[in-house]
Image (spheres, grey):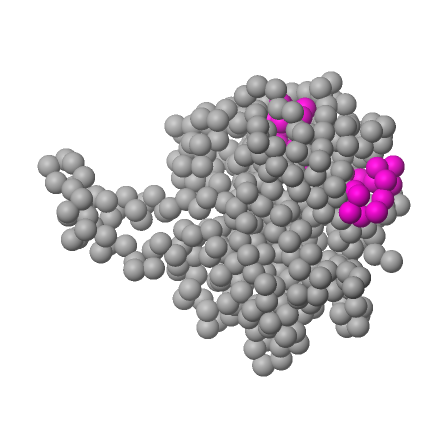
Amino acid sequence: MSERRVVITGLGVVTAGGMGIAELFENICAKSQSVKRIDLFDPSGFGCQVAGQLGDFSARKFVPRSYRKAVKVMARDIEIAVAAADLAVRDAGITTRGIDEQNVDIESARLGCNIGAGLICADLNELGAAVNTSVTDGAFDFKKWGSEGINNLTPLWLLKYLPNMLACHVTIIHGAKGPSNTITCGEASGYLAAGEAARTIARGAADAAIAGGAESKVNPMNLLRQSLLGRVTTTGNDQPGQACKPFDADADGTVIGEGGGLLILEDQTRAASRSARIYAEFAGFGAACDPDGMNYLEAPKGNGLVRAISAAIADAGISPEQIDLVIPHGTGVPAEDAAEADALRRALGERAESVPVSPLTGGFGNLFAGAGAVQLAVAAMALHRQTIPPAVNYKKPNDACRLNVPKEPTEAKLQCVLCCIHATGGQDAAVVLKRYE
């Protein structure tokens, strides 16, 4: 039995650079800088004090009125996923239970949901207040915690911080009862979730799927982790918008961010039958794992990324010469950027010297588990609008990268776009999107 074609019909993105794909793409093309000084908490004790932070954001306006009480038990990562799902479903023109319960036009059992998630940080203020009630003579008292302190947390407290709760809330809201999964593989999570969803549709186990990833790193614990790992820039506090410079000669680290993207992947026949707007075809997918990981402290090799890119290109049935645009991860960590560039040269050969490579991280920060689906959404929009987006903050080429990084938006005849990402834990993934014909 031949596999079904899978297309992208809905794009939902939530980033500091824009809410919704139209706003985000316009801001990228305008080279808008959205990284600012952190105000969700006091960052003064950190070397890096800037982030791609969402503004006045709440999921309340993205959920049905009857579900708004549930927002109280959503961590920020969950709220981002719920908002992105609403934007994606509406953009696709599909009516789910979360849009209009009386006029649902897709069978619940045929709608899947795969979402990539990260390590959700507990609300330190909420947890700290409860812990403070469990102190005896200046020391934490486990017995007092069990009898009194824990009662200061809501009974549903733990449900705010489980990674699978992103998909849980999205499936409940939209009545998605088809194949569902949560993937926690660092920065590669969103790609892996989309790849699994595409294969689910291709083999006929679902007709459509909500797929992607979301994460918020803008909290003290995650900023501390990335600082201890030596990944964040410490020189951009005075000019936050210019702090992150992927593939640039002056790059010296990444910037944490929060956001994510969810896509509506759909069987091509179903999408065509309802005259849906089709942004792109999900043509190829590849994944790999390098046990050595992306060792940013020494000399990362990127072998897994080479295998993932090669697998995606082969799966799409094309050659490297047919790639018209690359949307890479581009963290702004010099060693990681150099390793990613090397992987592109090894996988694409001579084509790597001339193909436009457009990193997105400079504009709104590193979204970690949320990065992949945002990259895919921007790639789909680039195909749809036949426009190559520029790299925000790219000024001077890094000799260690040697890539063709565009500084301005450019109209072009785009047929195939390669998207790729690496995770410091060793997971790698790549996707090829084709212009729909």
Nearest the viewer among 27 and 276 is 276
In this rendering, the answer to whether 244 lies above or below 119 is above
Relative placement, left or right, of 14 versus 42 is right
Question: Quarter-wise, where is residue 87 in the image?
Answer: bottom right
Residue 316 appears in the rendering: yes
Task: Give residue 429's position: percent from left, percent from top.
Answer: 66, 41
244 inside magenta stretch: no
Q: Position of residue 313 (x, y in %)?
A: 79, 42
Query: Residue furthest toward the bottom?
Result: 102
Task: Name the image quarter holding the N terminus.
Answer: bottom right
Residue at point 69% right, 56% down? 199
Q: Which quarter of the figure is the C terminus placed in? A: bottom right
**Residue 405 visible in image:** no
Q: Is residue 337 magenta?
A: yes
Q: Which residue is drawn at 85% across and 44% down?
A: 318
Q: Position of residue 17 (x, y in %)?
A: 62, 45
Tell me where residue 82 appears, x and y as whole percent: 53, 59
Q: In this view, does 172 lie above or below 37?
A: below
Nearest the viewer among 343 and 413 is: 343
Residue at horizontal 30 percent and vertical 46 percent from the top = 127
Residue drawn at x 19%, y 48% is: 145
Which residues are the magenta region?
313-339
Which residue appears farthest toward the front when viewing the image?
1
Task: Using the rendered view, name the quadrant where residue 263 is placed.
Answer: bottom right
How many numbered marks have been drawn onto this rendered protein structure? 0
